């Protein structure tokens, strides 16, 4: 009798765990799949080596605070990008092609330059929602090259979310 009770409890526990896993899988299926490509360093100097990955990851973290999504593995994203275009920003057609080939609904990409005259980082961001018609260049963001540069990612993430709600 006691062993039947333990077996029954074990079966209930297994059903609960399986149900929880299925609910998590269903939730992930309903979330948007997002690819965030590493921002290209177009400064022409070696002074901003930390920026491509730092800016990209900071934008991801800021976006996560604004809405839920499943991010495509960054290594997979970069490999897929190189198959379409070795360097440079993907245009509308290439970005739409990327989205289809990689089953992502939102593609975020960009580059940054250095304006030496104004001592500012200039960030250009583009988003694609999977078609040529839904490819947008966001307003350029400028920021001094001081400690405030880390708030730049929040501003870019705000721009991304604002543009996605327009489309």
Image: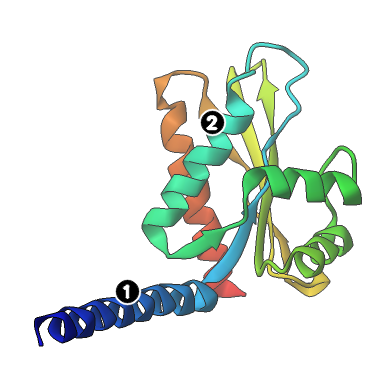
Q: Residue at x 24, y 77 (%)?
A: 10
Q: Residue at x 84, y 39 (%)?
A: 88
108 up-or-down from 11: above or below: above
Left or right for 82, reference 30: right
Front-most of 76 and 88?
76
Q: Position of residue 58 (x, y in %)?
A: 48, 39
**Circle 2 is placed at which residue position?**
54
Q: Position of residue 22 (x, y in %)?
A: 43, 79
Q: Quadrant of the C terminus?
A: bottom right
Left or right for 26, reference 122: left
Query: Mark 1–mark 2 contact, CB under 8 Å?
Result: no
User: Tag on residue 124?
Assistant: none
Is the residue marked by circle 1 packed among few (<14), some (14-19), or many (20+) residues within 10 Å? few
Seen as rendered, the residue at the extreme left is 2
Q: Position of residue 35 (x, y in %)?
A: 64, 55
Front-most of 144 and 27?
27
Question: Mark 2 or mark 1, which is nearer the start of the sequence?
Answer: 1
Image color mode: rainbow
The Cα atoms of the two marked residues, 1 and 2, are separated by: 37 Å
**Circle 1 is placed at which residue position?**
17
Indicate the secondary structure of the residue bearing disc 2. helix
22 up-or-down from 56: above or below: below
Query: In the picture, residue 94 is in which quadrant?
Result: bottom right
Q: Position of residue 123 (x, y in %)?
A: 63, 37
Left or right for 59, reference 108: left
Query: In the picture, residue 141 is in which quadrant?
Result: top right
Q: Residue 142, can we see it?
A: no
């Amino acid at each position: 009798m006691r062993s039947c009770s333990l077996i029954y409890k074990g079966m209930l526990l297994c059903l609960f765990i399986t149900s929880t896993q299925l609910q998590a899988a269903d939730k992930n299926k309903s979330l948007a799949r997002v690819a965030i490509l590493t921002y290209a360093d177009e400064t022409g100097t070696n002074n901003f080596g930390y920026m491509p990955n730092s800016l990209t990851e900071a934008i991801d973290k800021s976006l996560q605070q604004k809405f839920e999504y499943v991010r495509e593995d960054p290594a997979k994203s970069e490999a897929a990008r190189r198959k379409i275009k070795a360097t440079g920003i993907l245009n509308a057609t290439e970005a739409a092609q990327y989205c289809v080939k990689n089953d992502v609904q939102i593609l975020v990409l960009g580059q940054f330059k250095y304006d030496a005259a104004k001592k500012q980082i200039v960030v250009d961001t583009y988003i694609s929602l999977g078609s040529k018609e839904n490819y947008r260049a966001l307003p350029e963001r400028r920021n001094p090259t001081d400690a405030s540069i880390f708030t730049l990612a929040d501003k870019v993430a705000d721009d991304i979310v604002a543009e996605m709600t327009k489309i």
